[in-house]
Image (tube, helix red, strand yellow):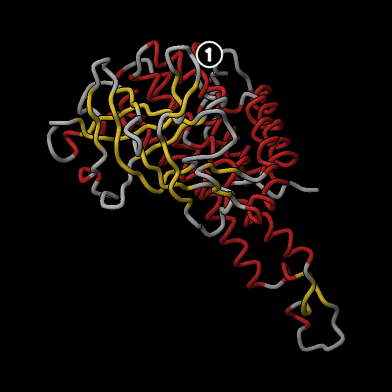
Amino acid sequence: MANLLVDERDAKFVLYEQLNIEELCESEEFSEFSREMFDMVMEAAQKLAEKEIAPTNVEGDTIGVKLENGKVSVAPSFHSAYQRYCEGGWASLPISQDHGGQGFPSLLYVAAMELFVSANQALMMYPGLTIGAARLIELYGTEDQQRMYMDKMYTGEWCGTMCLTEPQAGSDVGALRTKAVKRPDGTYSIAGGKIFISAGDHDLTENIIHMVLARIEGAPAGTKGISIFIVPKFRYDESGNLVDNDVTTMAVEKKMGIHGSATCALNFGEKDNCIGFLLGGENQGMKIMFNMMNEARLSVGVQGLAQASTAYMHALKYAKERYQGPEISTMKDPKAPKVPIIQHPDIRRMLMWMKSVTEGIRSLLYYAAYCEDRVHIAKTSEDAAKYQTLS
């Protein structure tokens, strides 16, 4: 069966002819890679997307997620597909080898993610924010925080989330009410509620690490007084065992189209026993979180691209198979044979519009990832600033 997820020909055109990803291999950072390796990765990604991830889409949509006794469970088939995703190293594809990743260019990672998200967006929402959350710990966390949380997040063993929005604080983040009170041991008691948390709770992984914006007692009002905390669903006790960290799932949002994804309302500290760990310095939450926000923006773009891509591929297939009406030049002949609807001019016009828009989005998003790679390999601050601005 033909690939109904991504136009492989166009994806390769953008990778190899428009952006010339092979030029990245001339840098020290990507010198061990080649076009042959990139092709192997994309072939493996397509196989995983078609054979393991896509078959879970229907079950995820029909079964959805279940919230019972404060715990969220996902569609049964999601578990094996997610396991294959992690075993293949896809969770750490663009992560530096120094941190246990494979070190591939972000451009290739975005191309692979287009395949996976096209196959099942709801499933890919669960690992979707994990890399971004782990990168915050890589950039701003202590050595202990990196070993305790980041390592397991980069392998996909644990997932991560972004917790910003509150009922009264959506785009006005400075109005948040979640508070943090410093404890004698340097940790913080967290209390408050967050809504619209993608993958806020589920049973795919043993633990979920939340990046939570909160205001420390006595901090300035508005965004200047916001700090960010690592708040695990389960935290380690003094004996090294994972124990409940007083993070409660209050509800799962009902959404159109991605029923298999758990978007949750979470309460922190209902029993006054939720402990958070400061990430970076006090009142630096917005600055730190924007590292994750910028990455999330590209990921959301990939979600839109993926849906447009698979919609076009399915529409094209249907138009080639669906027979209705005669060809336009013989439409007045009652004996004229029926033809596939792709032969009708207006159908061709609609398909061409879908194709051109999808290809334009793909080119733009791949280019954004390419710019990230160019920042990474830049030899001068001027080059880094140039591509940072473009990305």
Residue 268 % position (x, y): 35, 37
The answer to whether residue 190 is left or right of residue 235 is left
Residue 355 % position (x, y): 59, 56
On screen, 382 above or below 355?
Answer: above
Residue at (50%, 48%) from the top-left corner?
Answer: 361
Query: Are there few (<14), some (14-19), or many (20+) residues within 10 Å of tag 1?
Result: few
Residue at (67%, 54%) from the top-left corner?
Answer: 313
Three-letter residue code for mark 1: Gln
Location of the C terminus (image quadrant) = top left
* Tag 1 residue: 97
Name the outermost residue toward the front. Answer: 271
Residue at (50%, 17%) from the top-left corner?
Answer: 241
Residue 187 % position (x, y): 29, 20
The answer to whether residue 379 is left or right of residue 123 is left
The answer to whether residue 360 is left or right of residue 10 is left
On screen, 50 above or below 329?
Answer: above
Labels in figure, total: 1
On screen, 360 above or below 152?
Answer: below
